[in-house]
Amino acid sequence: MSPVRRCSRTACGRPAVATLTYVYADSTAVLGPLATYAEPHCYDLCAEHGERLTAPRGWEVVRLADPSAPTRPSGDDLEALANAVREAARPPSREAEGRGRGARTADPVEVARRGHLRVLRSPES
Ligand SMILES: [Zn+2]
């Protein structure tokens, strides 16, 4: 017999449907699917309290998509970024093609930036 998880808000006894996790390092509150295990810094919330959740000052609230949804957009974004970074990190082809036509080559153009990562694209492509 497994006890029903309840909303952690005071005076709220509704069944919990989501788990709120505080990521102190990033000042981010992540509201996601009900966690399998109760962990420190995690608070179970009912549907109503999950919707009404507001972040403390200076914090960001991230609401994870319905776990039953087929796609994980954030993961795709990261994968796309990783692919773009890998392409940008390849040695420039103009090195292999010879430096004789170097007059028309230009510095790579920065097309994206996330954190310390920059995605560069050669202007001729
Ligand atoms: Zn509640």
Image (tube, helix red, strand yellow):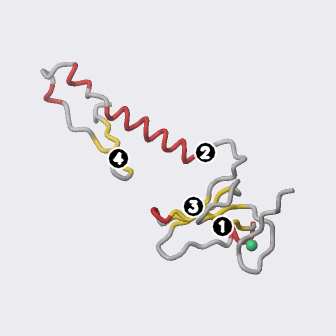
Of the two numbered discs 1 and 2 in the rendering, the one whose residue sits closer to the viewer: 1
Q: Are marks 1 and 3 in contact (CB under 8 Å)?
A: no
The disc labelled 3 sits on which kind of residue? Val
Q: Amino acid at mark 4?
A: Leu
Give the alpha-carbon distance from disc 2 to disc 3, as whole Å: 14 Å
Mark sitting earlier along the chain (3/4)? 3
The residue under the point 70% across, 61% down is 18
**Disc number placed over residue 43 in the picture, else none:** 1
x, y percentage for residue 60? 51, 66
Compare residues 32 and 9 and report the one nearer the observer.
Answer: 9
Comes first in the chain, label 1 or label 3: 1
Mark 3, residue position = 62
Residue 2: image x %, image y %? 83, 57
Question: Dots 1 and 2: beta carbons under 8 Å?
Answer: no
Residue 74 in the figure: left or right of residue 49: left
Quarter that holds the N terminus: bottom right
Work out whether mark 2 precedes mark 4 in sequence or the reverse, and give the earlier one.
2
Q: Could you tell me residue 125's position as x and y percent?
A: 33, 31
Disc 4 secondary structure class: strand
Mark 1 or mark 2: whose residue is earlier in sequence: 1
Q: Is residue 120 above or below residue 9?
A: above
Residue 48 relative to residue 108: left or right: right
Read off the residue under disc 4.
117
Relative height, residue 82 to residue 35 (above, below):
above
Q: Which residue is mark 2?
A: 72
Q: Nearer the viewer, residue 58 or 23?
A: 23
Q: CA distance from mark 2 to mark 4?
A: 22 Å
Q: Position of residue 121 (x, y in %)?
A: 32, 37
Label 2: state its secondary structure.
Answer: loop
Q: Earlier in the sequence, mark 1 or mark 4?
A: 1
